Image (spheres, helix red, strand yellow):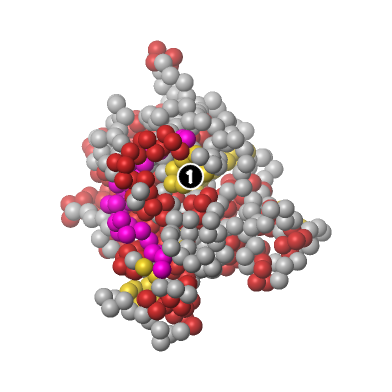
């Protein structure tokens, strides 16, 4: 009789957080790892008992005498819970860390096997009998198994009498053939990732990276809505800012840290002037070759899906995005970004950017769209023709990340929650202007170079990997609708704050009355979401901000931010069209102490010139 889970402790959230805090955060020889753990709070007992739980929940594994950790920094309880809610769907027994199972007992995923058994045998609801039927022997330590199922699975409930019931809305996932003896395979699958990159990893240069105040403003906007525009004249470091954030968040897991120049969670898309449709972003069918042209952008979204459960931020830099008309080549994305919805499980999902039909179509025998997307077959050496020749059942198990294949076939290619799109723009006579449709859907920043000081020579730009990346929860946008967030109790505004928000929106609209620049629900919603994001960031970074960081979470500061990011960029035109509303907004900004807004409006008004014949806009 084998135990489904170690008896040492139940896999409670505080225990997971504690284990991660004690485990080393970088790869090292096994001997060094064991010595470090002997000095941990568990002492020498770690390598006798505690290690078993840490390995069973996928926090590390040993491969060829080398210790390899799951997390490269400490985690909080929220991150631990999200991880365990994914882990429960992938945990299987027997595995490399279970003991006393019969040698003939084959590995099966716990959760989906129980679901399948109840579907086929609805009258057998006793947990012990179900497990016996599934594995062919009695399973020990059912109390700990019962705990993790009840705590982390929303699909199954087990009562005090060990009677199992299915939630009416349970989700069934595809049952996979899993290895009982391959420790690396077990480590990968319980975290929901797989990787085919065999390049040598690049070692981290520093322990951590220090960010600047403006970068925390970017992060607050990203957490509000993962679509930013960085504007300004050429050479101000807009594209570099995106890469800096990617390096600052890239885990050194041996997969994403294999390039000296670009982390694996970063993609540069150079926009071309001749882009007048979406094919360079979302690809296209070729009726001649009977295949599909797969773009780097598509491959990157699929790679991001492999890391979505780990909340690793993935950055797309649309470089010089206004060299071509954005509304033409990026129209599909602009629509899909507005379809974002938070599910009851707390995941943000979207409509498909590329429909499911693309992934269900039959192409030429020598073409497989999933292999083109970078997904790795389960068998080494398989070619597209080999997979296409398989029977349907065999094809349903043909890829290491079959879950991604199945999702693409069912839902199409959606935008993963961990993907952040940042467009850089140069505002000059060689580029296209933005419509308000684009400005409305993005969080907008202007990059301005101030006076250079002697500290320019003190430190280079941090374009390198670090041992302890910035916490991923800083960057993940997990709220969409402010009213739903408030109604569910995840965030609260005081009565006074509610009034202040409405007074802000209504007051600005009064100033914009009679112009095409008036604002509506979208900006009201994102004002509240930005306030929530800034408060969440302050909570996450409490006591951890770098020296000299000024991160203001005051609601009045949020109003200044929204004016600069969402409202003023909409205003452009001649004196007759813009002067009246700008003058009113300037007076309001002065009264409310919105200093940046007041300075920017002063700049915009001066652009009319003394004879009032000029044209004004937000951009320098």
Judging by the rendered image, the residue that carries numbered circle 1 is 62
How would you rate the neighbour count of disc 1 (Cα within 10 Å): few for under 14, some for 14-19, many for 20 or more? some
Vertical relation: 288 (above or below) 127: above
Would you place residue 184 above or below residue 616 in this image?
below
Q: Describe the element under mark 1 as helix, strand or loop.
A: strand
Q: Which residues are magenta?
A: 1-29
478 horizontally vs 420: left or right: left
Which residue is painted at 75% across and 66% down in the image? Answer: 389
- Give the residue furthest to the bottom: 123
The quadrant in which residue 596 appears is top left
Q: Residue 146, relative to residue 520: is it above or below?
A: below
* Residue 19 seen in render: yes
Instruction: Judge by depth and name the residue closer to the eye, 367 or 330.
Output: 367
| Residue 375, horizontal then vertical, whole percent | 63, 54
Per the image, is 182 magenta? no
Q: Residue at x 49, y 67 (%)?
A: 102
Q: Is residue 404 visible?
A: no
230 or 295: nearer the viewer: 295
């Amino acid at each position: 009789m084998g135990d489904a889970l170690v008896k040492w402790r139940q896999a409670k959230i505080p225990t997971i957080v504690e284990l991660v805090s004690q485990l080393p955060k970088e790869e090292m020889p096994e001997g060094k790892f064991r010595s470090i753990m002997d000095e941990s709070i568990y002492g020498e007992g770690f390598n006798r008992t505690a290690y078993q739980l840490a390995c069973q929940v996928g926090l590390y594994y040993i491969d060829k005498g080398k210790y390899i950790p799951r997390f490269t920094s400490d985690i909080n309880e929220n991150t631990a819970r999200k991880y365990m809610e994914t882990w429960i769907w992938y945990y299987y027994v027997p595995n490399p860390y279970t003991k006393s199972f019969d040698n003939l007992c084959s590995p099966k995923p716990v959760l989906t096997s129980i679901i399948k058994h109840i579907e086929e045998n609805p009258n057998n609801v006793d947990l012990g009998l179900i497990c016996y039927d599934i594995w062919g022997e009695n399973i020990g330590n059912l109390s700990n198994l019962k705990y993790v199922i009840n705590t982390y699975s929303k699909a199954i409930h087990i009562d005090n009498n060990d009677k199992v019931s299915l939630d009416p809305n349970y989700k069934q996932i595809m049952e996979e053939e899993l290895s009982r003896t391959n420790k690396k395979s077990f480590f990968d699958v319980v975290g929901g990732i797989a990787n085919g990159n065999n390049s040598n990893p690049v070692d981290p240069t520093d322990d951590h990276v220090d960010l600047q105040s403006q970068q925390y403003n970017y992060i607050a906007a990203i957490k509000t809505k993962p679509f930013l525009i960085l504007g300004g004249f050429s050479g101000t470091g807009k594209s570099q800012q995106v890469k800096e954030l990617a390096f600052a968040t890239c885990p050194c897991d041996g997969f994403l840290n294999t390039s000296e120049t670009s982390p694996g969670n970063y993609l540069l898309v150079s926009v071309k002037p001749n882009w007048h449709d979406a094919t360079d972003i979302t690809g296209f069918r070729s009726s001649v070759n009977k295949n599909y042209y797969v773009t780097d952008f598509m491959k990157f979204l699929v790679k991001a899906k492999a890391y979505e459960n780990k909340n690793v931020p993935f950055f797309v830099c649309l470089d010089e995005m206004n060299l071509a008309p954005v509304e033409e080549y990026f129209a599909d994305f602009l629509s899909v970004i507005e379809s974002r919805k938070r599910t009851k499980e707390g995941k943000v999902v979207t409509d498909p950017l590329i429909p499911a039909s693309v992934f269900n179509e039959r192409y030429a025998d020598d073409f497989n769209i999933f292999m083109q997307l970078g997904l790795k077959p389960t068998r080494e050496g398989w070619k597209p023709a080999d997979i296409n020749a398989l029977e349907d059942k065999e094809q349903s198990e043909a890829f290491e990340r079959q879950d991604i294949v199945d999702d693409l076939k069912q839902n199409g290619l959606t935008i993963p929650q961990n993907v952040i799109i940042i467009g850089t723009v140069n505002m000059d006579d060689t580029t296209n202007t933005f419509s308000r449709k684009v400005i409305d859907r993005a969080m907008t920043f202007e990059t301005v170079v101030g006076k250079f000081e002697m500290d320019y020579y003190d430190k280079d730009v941090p374009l390198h990997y670090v041992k302890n990346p910035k916490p991923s929860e800083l960057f993940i946008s997990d709220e969409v609708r402010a009213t739903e967030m408030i109604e569910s109790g995840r965030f609260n505004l005081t009565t006074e704050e509610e009034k202040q928000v409405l007074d802000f929106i209504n007051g600005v609209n009064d100033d914009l009355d009679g112009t095409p620049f008036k604002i509506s629900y979208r900006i009201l919603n994102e004002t509240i979401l930005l306030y929530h994001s800034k408060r969440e960031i302050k909570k996450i970074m409490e006591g951890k901000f770098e020296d000299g960081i000024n991160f203001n979470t005051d609601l009045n500061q949020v109003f200044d931010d929204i004016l600069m990011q969402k409202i003023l960029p909409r205003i452009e035109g001649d004196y007759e069209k813009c002067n009246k509303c700008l003058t009113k907004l300037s007076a309001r900004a002065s009264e409310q102490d919105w200093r940046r807004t007041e300075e920017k409006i002063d700049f915009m008004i001066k652009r009319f010139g003394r004879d009032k014949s000029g044209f004004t806009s937000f951009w320098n």
